[in-house]
Image (cartoon, rainbow, N blue to C red):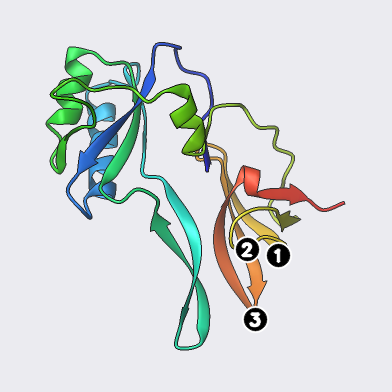
């Protein structure tokens, strides 16, 4: 699940873009650079590659890895204009928008919610060095010590003691709660 501040215009909708396999992060980086260079922040608001942390076991050792939730797809919140469509569609690695024919179809509110996109502001009362309890995901019930807070991405980096070793994990704001 990821959180996007609801500060942009109501006309912006979420669209799904199909990419070449393995190009999701390259497409995101290229689009973000193009948005900045062409000053398109008013029409293309967010570019996301949804990920989740999964605990994998290899050679008897468990390790947390970040996996793409939807390989081959990138989510974009944008106002559909000729220019924004052109910029996205002609980004290297993009094969097209998801939708019938050549017409992009925005996600419904139900689809956005089911994908774990939260568009509500979050109250944050956390500080670097503070201990928090992980409430969701594969690290649920673990205690973590905050190392870094990223307000823009609504994430924290925290040290989690797993199997006697401190492991740095990236957690979303809604995955942790303050200890009493």
Q: Earlier in the sequence, mark 3 or mark 1?
A: 1
Q: Is residue 109 left or right of residue 99?
A: right
Q: Which residue does the image show at 30% across and 33% down from the upper left?
A: 16
- Do tag 3 and tag 1 residues touch (Cβ < 8 Å)? no
Q: Earlier in the sequence, mark 3 or mark 2?
A: 2
**In the rendering, at what x and y percent does residue 47 appear?**
35, 35
**In the rendering, at what x and y percent does residue 101 appear?**
13, 24
Q: Which mark is residue 142?
A: 1
Q: Residues within 10 Å of mark 1 (few under 14, many from 20)?
A: some
In front here: 112 or 47?
112
Q: Is residue 177 left or right of residue 107?
A: right
In front here: 26 or 129?
26
Farthest residue to the right: give it. Answer: 180
Q: Residues within 10 Å of mark 3 (few under 14, many from 20)?
A: few
Q: Secondary structure at mark 3?
A: loop
- Do tag 2 and tag 1 residues touch (Cβ < 8 Å)? yes
Q: Secondary structure at mark 1?
A: loop
Q: Is residue 104 above or below residue 125?
A: above
Q: Which mark is residue 163?
A: 3
Farthest residue to the bottom: give it. Answer: 59
Distance from the alpha carbon under mark 3 to that under mark 1: 11 Å
Residue that badge 2 annotates? 139
Q: Which mark is residue 86?
A: none
Q: Which residue does the image show at 13% across and 23% down from the upper left?
A: 102
Q: Is residue 9 left or right of residue 142?
A: left
- Do tag 3 and tag 2 residues touch (Cβ < 8 Å)? no
**In the rendering, at what x and y percent does residue 57 appear?**
48, 78
**In the rendering, at what x and y percent does residue 77 appear?**
37, 26
Q: Residues within 10 Å of mark 2 (few under 14, many from 20)?
A: many
Q: Which residue does the image show at 29% across and 35% down from the upper left?
A: 32
Q: Which residue does the image show at 18% across and 20% down from the upper left?
A: 103
């Amino acid at each position: 699940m990821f959180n996007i501040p609801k500060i942009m215009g109501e006309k912006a909708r979420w669209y799904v873009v199909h990419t070449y396999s393995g190009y999701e992060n390259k497409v995101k980086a290229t689009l973000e650079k193009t948005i900045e260079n062409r000053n398109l922040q008013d029409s293309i608001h967010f570019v996301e590659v949804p990920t989740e942390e999964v605990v994998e076991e290899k050679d008897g050792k468990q390790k947390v890895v970040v996996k793409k939730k939807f390989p081959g797809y990138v989510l974009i919140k944008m106002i559909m204009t000729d220019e924004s469509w052109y910029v996205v569609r002609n980004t290297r690695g993009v094969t097209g928008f998801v939708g019938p024919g050549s017409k992009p179809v925005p996600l419904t509110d139900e689809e956005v919610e089911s994908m774990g996109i939260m568009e509500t502001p979050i109250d944050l009362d956390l500080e670097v060095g503070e201990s928090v309890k992980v409430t969701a995901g594969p690290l649920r019930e673990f205690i973590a010590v905050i190392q870094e807070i990223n307000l823009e991405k609504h994430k924290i980096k925290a040290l989690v003691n797993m199997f006697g070793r401190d492991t740095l994990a990236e957690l979303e704001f809604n995955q942790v709660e303050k200890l009493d």
